[in-house]
Structures are given as structure tokens and as C-alpha cells.
Image (spheres, coloured by chain):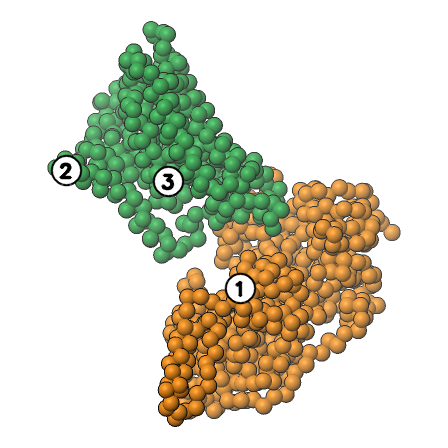
Chain colours: A orange, B green
């Protein structure tokens, strides 16, 4: 057998006293696709960063083509023909695809010349790519293509793809896989990081599993099953089924009618959208990144101007109300953006202060009203009434805030959701991603909302933390809260949600019952290839028992 | 009218030096508010260079004087640019604060340096520098009188005016059509990306900040020796500082394009000239006229912000320090 393309021997990497990778030995044969599987925080990306020169291993040796290699910078990796496509794209927005590809590489520079070169690489492997298109005009999958072509342009023989499918629709994933197969035919060796098991089964030749920074084992894909891989990954058999409790659906709580919202760039982000949420149901929102989820959340929460259409809460329009007034009506939003900290929490404030940020009007100065019998006209009762009114006024308008109550709330959230933090006074940015998300969700739930909008609540969380979040959502659902769940993972949405609505470029493609649909159907709808609204001629997204008082029908 | 346009150009090229210098700096992601001070440094260095060439000889060489003056202007301005680069690139100091400090230093230093070190109340020196300004820096191509208004406006400029336009064209070509330009624009947009593909971020930043400073420094020289014909006054630094701020405004006005800056600088030159030569208004109202270029810049900002096109925006990471480990 020929030399392996890449071989790691006893590689370790420590961050402080924490071992991110511990004694890992791994081989990558020439012309194979190796899947690297592991939960979040299991050290997959750290390991790959050592191969691509971003980190330097503390212990162990790396062999490329049988030769020991020192990879201390990305340039060393390029020289060894190793190229990595990161999860977060590293592209210059105002450059064309071709300019991004040739950036930093040698050779003569000329617009026509580089366009030809990049075009020919794209053709060779079957990418669809316009070399002259600017990055800011591109979809996520096009950007990913640029990243891959960039690596190929530098002549990489070993490609590392870090969760490439996380941002793609099933159809785009298929396309990526066929390109990967073409590259494999061409003799390239590929490592793909993913935590989607069915993709592992579909594309890889072998699977290597990491758990908590340790190497668990490597098996040929043909001999593995999803169950056996999960067991290797998690360490014990876990229940993969997400609970979907049956609840009595209530009257529609939140109704959206013909909503149009513009994006920051001025294009229609939400285009004539109608849907509703009932109490006690979880409505999933599926769609590729940037199909209007963010704008929808912001419009409901009052953060974004509504161009036309209506948003009704229990039959009352909330369009034009301030975010504060909307949240006082019982609509809570938790949006986890890509960087996790961007929206909702102030990173350098403590957990307590972050509780206070949203809930301070209900804290006020913490003056509790003294109960007074109605009809009691004694001077004492009159005095107490004045006192209560004054107290309520102070609670609302007092310039001071009651930190003790915020602290109590912070401690309540920490305890109930199992947030791992040294104390309630720790700045939020020092917590790990999962704990930050719990704090955000916990704060939103604390106000006891009747509509909860949650976007990407499990973004980047490991399986156990994710299940905890699902439990929290299900608990709210049983208590009759209507939940809008904007998610990324279709498997999770199929299991957790009652109904799923699919958006494509801000348009409603249809609302389907989670139990009666399939991932393929959702994928087609996400890509805009299947439009139930047109196909079946049904009026979807308008409740039969609408509280708005229009006689439209909803065909369930 | 001919005089008006000729003057507009001769003032405009001072703006052009400052503007091209600042564009080169900003394209690497650094907002250098030290440009006014750096332009002053150029004036200080230039005057010293001229003095060294014209003193102690009865027949100084014109070419040598100009070359040495340019060299000294570049050296002085580059030195302050290097200080700015060291503070903001290597030490990652706040760019605005560092830039303002550079301006304060440059203006103060130049006032002292020109008055005490270069001139030192020596009327002989003043006369000789003025002579160099008149006959070396503003030497005309012979025979331009025959070309009518065209010659009067475009061909009777001093040598530095043509240098300014040449530098602006060169900057435009480098930024747009070369690999160096591609790399530096990438750094200004997203240094982490450029770093990841092997562009020497620190090297490029130092290179462009110091080149930018050197180019801006020539603006100071151009003011003293070109526009003022070598008339060195005690308020030189103050005036150059004002021109420097306008040059930074001009960068925004021209949307970071050196080629557009050539036209923009002539417009700014015309506006500036109007404010110094207009008659029929009271002395107290002159400062109001000085505001015109700023008002025009604000209008351009409003228009580009509303249009919001990606290509007319400043480099995305302008003003942000870059630290490799800070991913």
C-alpha cells in the first residue's frame, strides 16, 4: 500500500490546563474521504487547525506523504498542499470570486487571466461559479464554493472541510457531495467534519470519532451504522428521539397577515407572509440562512419596521408598538445569532445585570402593594391606596433599580437551567456558548411569555445541552405558550415541532405537519423547488378561528 | 479666469498630496488623523533641505535643491508616519488618539523648527529660500505663453504639481491593477482573511502607512515652496494643518479613489481659493467660506450613505486594530 497522505502520531494540544486534543493518532489514505465525527467541543476543529497551521501541536508528530512535517503557519500547510475550508468563510466581500481565489497566491495578476484560471478549475470539478461575481452578491453555498476553489487553486491535495453542510440545503449538499466525489476521483484526500450522521454514511469511506478531545476509533463506513457511530461519539447509548408532547391547541395567539418587511439592504426580506401560532404548539420555521428569519423575528419583536401587513396578538394589532410594549404583552424573543453574543445579551455585564437589562421595569424598586379590601373607606385604607399607587409609580419610574431581585432571578435561572457559572456576578462572555444561550432563553422565559420566539436556540450546543433546551421548550408548550422555533437542523425540527412552515426568499412555501412530512419535501421547499401554496391552491397560514375577524379558511 | 483656474490647481495639488497619502493609509485599514501634522513635517523637512542646498553657495543647483528638499520632506514626514505605524500597528494603540497626537506634535514641532532652526531670524536665509521657491520650484516650461489659456492653466504649474498628479495616477494603478493593490485592499477589508492566505499584514500596513505619510509630507513642501513661493511665515504650520483636515475630508469626498481625487482636489482648491480672495464681504465672514468644502463633503457622505453601495464605502476594517490571536 502507498504511503498515507497524512498521518498524525500522538498529537496533543492544551489550552491552559484543558486538553483540547489528547494523544490522537490518525491516518488519511490517498484518495479517500474521511469523516471526522464528534460532539461540540470534542476537539475536531482544534485538530484540523493543527493540520492547517493555525495552531501548533504541543506534543506529537505529523507526517505528510511519509515525511515528517512542521506546520507552524497556514503558509506551511499550503506548501504541503493542505488546504482547509473553515466554517466561517474568510472572504473579502467587495472582491470578485476570482480575486478572492488568487489573493495571497503567487503568479501574474490580471483580471482576465485570473477569471480564466478560476473558471477552468470550477469546470474541472463541476462547480457552478461565476468568477466575476462579487462575494456580497453570493449565496452561502456560492461562498463555500469560492472557498473550496481557493484551496484547489493553491494545488491542495489534502482538503479539510469544517462542517461544510451546516449552511446548505439538502439539494446543495448533494451538489457538494458530487463535487467531493469528483475531487476524490482526481486523487485528492478529503477530511470532512460533520455531526450529521446520515451524511457521514453517504459520503465517507472511513469515519474517525473523537470524544472530549480523545481519539475513540476509526471504522470503515461500510461496517458502521448510525447507532454504532452515535454510541462511539457520545459514549453511551442516548435516546435520539426528541419528545413531542401532545397538547390541546389553543386559540391562535399570534397571527401574521400578509406581512412585508424590508432587509437592511432594502430588498424584500419577508414577502406577503401569513401564518399563526396557537397556544401550546411549536411552529418550526425552516429555510436556508438569510431567507428572512432574522427580519421576521425583528418585525415581531418591534425592532424592524413593518412595510405592510399585520401582526396580531390575541386579535390586537401590535404593529408600530415599541419593543417594550410588545414584550409587556407577553411576546418574548430569544435570537441566537452566529456569534451567539450579538443579540440580546451584553457580554461584559454579569448574569445579574443581563437579567436586569430586560426585566428592570418589573423590578422597579421592589415595593410590594399592601392588599386593601375594596369598599373599605377607612382613613387607613385610603392611606394604603395612596401608598400602593405611589409604590407602583416608584416601581415604574424610580431612577434606581433593585439589584437584589435581579440577582434572585439570575440565581433562579442558573439553578433551573443548570447554567455552569462561578457566580451570578460573572460576566456573560466568560461563560461557554451553551451556558450563554441558557441565560438568554432563561431570561426570556422568566417573564412568563405567552408567545416565545426562539431562533437557533441550540446553535453550536452539544447533544446534552440541546436536549435540555428542548425540554425547556416543551415545558413551556405544555403550559400553553405558543412557540415559534427557528431552527437549522431539519431532523430536530421534524421531531420537536408540531407544524413546520418553510420560507424561501421571504415567501411562504407552505405549512406542513411535522409528522406528515419528510426531509426531502422540506428541502425542496427550502430551495424553492416545491411551492405548496401554488400547488395545492390552499390558503395556508390563516386560522379558521382567527381572532382578527375575517372569514378566511384554513385547511388543516 | 485663467488665473483663477491656475490658482485652483496650484492649491488643489496640496490637497491632492494629502488626500492620496491618506487614501494609501486608509486602504491598509488605518485612519490616520495625523495627516495634517505629517504634512507640516514635510514642510519642515523641505525647508531644511532647501536651506542646506542654497546656503553657502552663490550658484545653487535648481534640480539638486528640489531633489534634496523632496528627500528631506519624505524623511521627516515618513519619520512621523513610522511613529504612527509603530503605535497603531505594533502596539495596536487607538488610531484616532494616535493620529490626533501626531497632528498636535507635527504642528508644534514645525512651528518651532521653521522659525528657530531653519530661519532663525536670518533675512539672508529667508531671501534665499524665497529665491529657490520662485525660480526652482515654480520654474516654468519655456514657451508655454504661446499656448494661450491652456498653457497658462496647465503648463505653468510648479514641478510639484505634476509630481502630485503622477503620484495620484500611480496610486490608482497600483491599487486597482496590481497584486500589491489587491493585497492591501484585502487587508483594509479583512486583515484576518489576508493573513490566512499568507499576505504579510504587518509589512503591508507599515509600508502603506509610511508611503502614505511620505506622500502627504510632500503636500507640506508643496505649500511652502510651491504655492507660497518659498515665503516662509510664522503661521505656516497652522495653515497647513487646515489644509490637512480638508485633505482628509477630500478622501471621503472622492470615495477612496485616487484618480477621482485629482478632480476633487481641483474643486477643493477652487473653493479654498475663493474663500481667500473673495471681495465684498467682511473679514468676520471669511471663516464661513472656509466651511464650504466641509459642507460639500457632508453632502457627499449623505448621498453615498443613502445610496449605500458597497463599493463607495470605506474599507470595512478601517480603524480597527488587527491582532492575529484575537480570532
Question: Is residue A504 something that shows in the picture?
Answer: no
Residue at 62%, 42% in the rendered image: B198
Give the label on residue A353, or none: 1
The residue beneath circle 2 is: B282
Residue at 48%, 78% in the rendered image: A368
Same subunit: marks 2 and 1: no
Residue A348: percent from left, percent from top: 55, 57
Residue B138: percent from left, percent from top: 30, 21
The residue beneath circle 3 is: B248
Q: Chain of mark 1?
A: A
A115 displayed left or right of A549: right
Residue A443: percent from left, percent from top: 55, 71
Displayed quadrant of residue A80 = top right
Say above or below: A298 vs A108.
below
Q: Secondary structure at mark 1?
A: helix
Same subunit: marks 2 and 3: yes
Marks 2/3: CA–CA distance: 28 Å
**Quadrant housing the N terminus of chain B:** top left
Marks 2/1: CA–CA distance: 58 Å
- Numbered disc in front, either 2 or 1: 1
Displayed quadrant of residue A319 = bottom left
Say above or below: B101 vs A412.
above
- Numbered disc in front, either 1 or 3: 1
Q: Residue furthest bottom?
A: A375
Residue situated in front as seen by the camera: A25 or A219: A25
Q: Secondary structure at mark 2?
A: loop
Same subunit: marks 1 and 3: no
Question: Is residue A134 something that shows in the picture?
Answer: yes
Give the label on residue A137, or none: none
Amino acid at each position: 500500500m502507498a504511503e498515507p497522505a497524512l498521518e498524525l502520531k500522538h498529537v496533543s494540544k492544551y489550552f491552559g490546563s484543558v486538553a483540547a486534543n489528547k494523544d490522537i493518532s490518525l491516518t488519511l489514505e490517498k484518495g479517500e474521504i474521511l469523516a471526522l465525527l464528534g460532539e461540540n467541543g470534542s476537539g475536531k476543529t482544534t485538530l484540523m487547525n493543527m493540520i492547517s497551521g493555525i495552531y501548533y501541536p504541543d506534543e506529537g508528530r505529523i507526517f505528510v506523504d511519509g515525511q515528517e512535517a512542521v506546520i507552524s503557519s497556514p503558509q506551511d500547510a499550503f506548501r504541503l498542499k493542505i488546504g482547509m475550508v473553515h466554517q466561517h468563510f474568510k472572504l473579502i466581500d467587495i472582491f470578485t470570486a476570482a480575486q478572492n481565489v488568487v489573493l495571497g497566491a503567487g503568479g501574474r495578476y490580471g483580471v482576465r487571466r485570473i477569471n480564466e484560471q478560476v473558471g477552468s478549475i470550477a469546470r474541472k470539478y463541476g462547480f457552478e461559479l461565476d468568477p466575476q461575481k462579487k462575494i456580497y452578491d453570493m449565496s452561502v453555498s456560492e461562498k463555500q464554493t469560492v472557498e473550496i476553489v481557493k484551496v484547489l487553486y493553491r494545488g491542495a491535495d489534502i482538503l479539510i472541510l469544517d462542517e461544510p453542510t451546516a449552511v446548505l440545503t439538502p439539494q446543495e449538499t448533494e451538489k457538494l457531495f458530487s463535487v467531493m466525489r469528483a475531487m476524490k476521483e482526481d486523487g485528492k484526500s478529503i477530511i470532512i467534519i460533520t455531526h450529521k450522521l446520515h451524511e457521514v454514511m453517504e459520503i465517507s469511506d472511513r469515519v474517525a470519532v473523537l470524544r472530549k478531545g480523545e481519539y475513540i476509533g476509526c471504522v470503515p463506513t461500510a461496517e458502521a451504522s448510525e447507532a454504532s457511530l452515535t454510541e462511539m461519539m457520545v459514549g453511551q447509548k442516548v435516546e435520539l428521539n426528541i419528545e413531542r408532547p401532545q397538547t390541546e391547541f389553543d386559540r391562535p395567539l399570534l397571527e401574521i397577515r400578509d406581512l412585508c418587511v424590508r432587509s437592511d439592504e432594502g430588498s424584500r426580506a419577508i414577502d406577503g407572509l401569513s401564518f399563526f401560532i396557537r397556544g401550546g404548539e411549536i411552529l418550526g420555521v425552516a429555510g436556508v440562512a438569510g431567507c428572512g428569519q432574522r427580519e421576521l423575528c425583528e418585525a415581531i419583536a418591534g425592532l424592524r419596521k413593518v412595510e405592510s401587513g399585520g401582526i396580531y396578538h390575541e386579535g390586537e394589532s401590535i404593529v408600530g408598538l415599541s419593543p417594550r410594549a410588545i414584550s409587556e404583552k407577553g411576546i418574548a424573543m430569544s435570537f441566537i445569532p452566529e456569534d451567539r453574543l450579538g443579540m440580546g445579551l451584553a457580554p461584559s455585564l454579569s448574569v445579574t445585570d443581563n437579567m436586569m437589562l430586560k426585566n428592570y421595569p418589573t423590578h422597579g424598586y421592589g415595593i410590594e402593594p399592601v392588599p386593601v379590601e375594596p369598599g373599605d373607606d377607612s382613613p387607613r385604607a385610603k392611606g394604603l391606596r395612596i401608598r400602593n399607587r405611589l409604590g407602583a409609580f416608584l416601581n415604574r419610574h424610580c431612577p434606581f433599580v433593585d439589584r437584589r431581585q435581579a440577582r434572585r432571578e439570575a440565581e433562579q435561572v442558573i439553578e433551573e437551567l443548570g447554567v455552569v457559572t462561578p457566580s451570578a456576578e460573572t460576566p456573560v462572555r466568560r461563560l461557554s456558548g451553551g451556558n450563554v444561550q441558557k441565560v438568554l432563553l432563561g431570561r426570556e422565559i422568566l417573564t412568563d411569555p405567552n408567545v416565545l420566539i426562539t431562533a437557533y436556540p441550540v446553535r453550536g450546543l452539544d447533544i446534552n445541552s440541546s436536549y435540555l433546551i428542548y425540554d425547556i421548550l416543551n415545558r413551556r408548550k405544555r403550559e400553553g405558550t405558543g412557540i415559534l422555533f427557528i431552527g437549522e437542523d431539519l431532523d430536530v425540527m421534524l421531531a420537536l415541532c408540531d407544524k413546520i412552515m418553510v420560507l424561501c426568499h421571504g415567501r411562504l412555501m407552505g405549512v406542513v405537519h411535522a409528522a406528515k412530512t419528510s426531509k426531502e419535501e422540506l428541502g425542496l421547499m427550502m430551495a424553492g423547488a416545491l411551492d405548496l401554496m401554488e400547488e395545492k391552491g390552499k390558503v395556508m397560514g390563516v386560522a379558521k378561528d382567527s381572532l382578527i375577524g375575517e372569514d378566511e379558511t384554513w385547511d388543516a | 479666469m485663467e488665473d483663477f483656474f491656475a490658482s485652483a490647481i496650484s492649491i488643489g495639488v496640496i490637497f491632492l498630496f494629502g488626500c492620496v497619502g491618506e487614501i494609501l493609509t486608509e486602504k491598509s485599514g488605518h485612519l490616520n488623523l495625523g495627516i495634517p501634522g505629517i504634512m507640516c513635517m514635510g514642510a519642515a523637512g523641505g525647508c531644511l533641505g532647501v536651506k542646506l542646498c542654497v546656503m553657502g553657495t552663490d550658484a545653487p543647483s535648481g534640480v539638486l535643491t528640489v531633489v534634496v528638499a523632496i528627500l528631506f520632506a519624505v524623511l521627516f514626514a515618513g519619520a512621523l508616519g513610522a511613529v504612527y505605524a509603530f503605535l497603531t500597528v505594533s502596539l495596536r494603540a487607538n488610531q484616532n488618539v494616535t493620529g490626533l497626537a501626531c497632528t498636535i506634535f507635527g504642528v508644534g514641532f514645525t512651528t518651532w523648527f521653521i522659525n528657530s532652526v531653519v530661519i532663525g531670524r536670518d533675512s539672508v536665509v529667508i531671501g534665499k529660500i524665497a529665491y529657490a521657491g520662485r525660480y526652482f520650484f515654480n520654474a516654468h516650461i519655456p514657451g508655454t505663453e504661446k499656448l494661450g489659456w491652456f498653457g497658462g492653466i496647465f503648463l505653468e504649474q510648479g514641478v510639484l504639481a505634476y509630481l502630485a498628479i503622477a503620484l495620484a495616477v500611480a496610486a490608482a494603478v497600483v491599487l486597482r491593477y496590481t497584486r500589491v493593490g489587491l493585497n492591501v485592499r484585502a487587508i483594509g477589508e479583512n486583515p484576518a482573511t489576508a493573513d490566512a492566505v499568507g499576505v504579510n499584514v504587518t509589512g503591508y500596513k507599515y509600508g502603506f502607512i509610511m508611503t502614505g505619510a511620505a506622500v502627504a509630507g510632500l503636500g507640506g513642501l508643496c505649500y511652502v515652496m510651491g504655492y507660497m513661493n518659498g515665503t516662509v511665515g510664522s503661521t505656516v504650520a497652522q495653515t497647513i494643518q487646515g489644509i490637512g483636515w480638508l485633505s482628509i475630508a477630500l478622501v471621503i469626498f472622492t470615495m477612496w479613489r485616487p484618480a477621482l481625487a485629482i478632480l476633487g482636489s481641483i474643486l477643493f482648491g477652487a473653493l479654498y481659493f475663493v474663500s481667500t480672495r473673495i471681495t465684498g464681504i467682511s473679514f468676520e465672514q471669511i471663516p464661513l467660506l472656509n466651511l464650504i468644502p466641509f459642507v460639500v463633503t457632508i453632502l457627499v457622505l449623505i448621498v453615498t450613505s443613502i445610496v449605500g453601495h458597497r463599493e463607495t464605502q470605506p474599507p470595512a476594517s478601517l480603524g480597527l486594530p488587527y491582532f492575529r490571536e484575537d480570532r
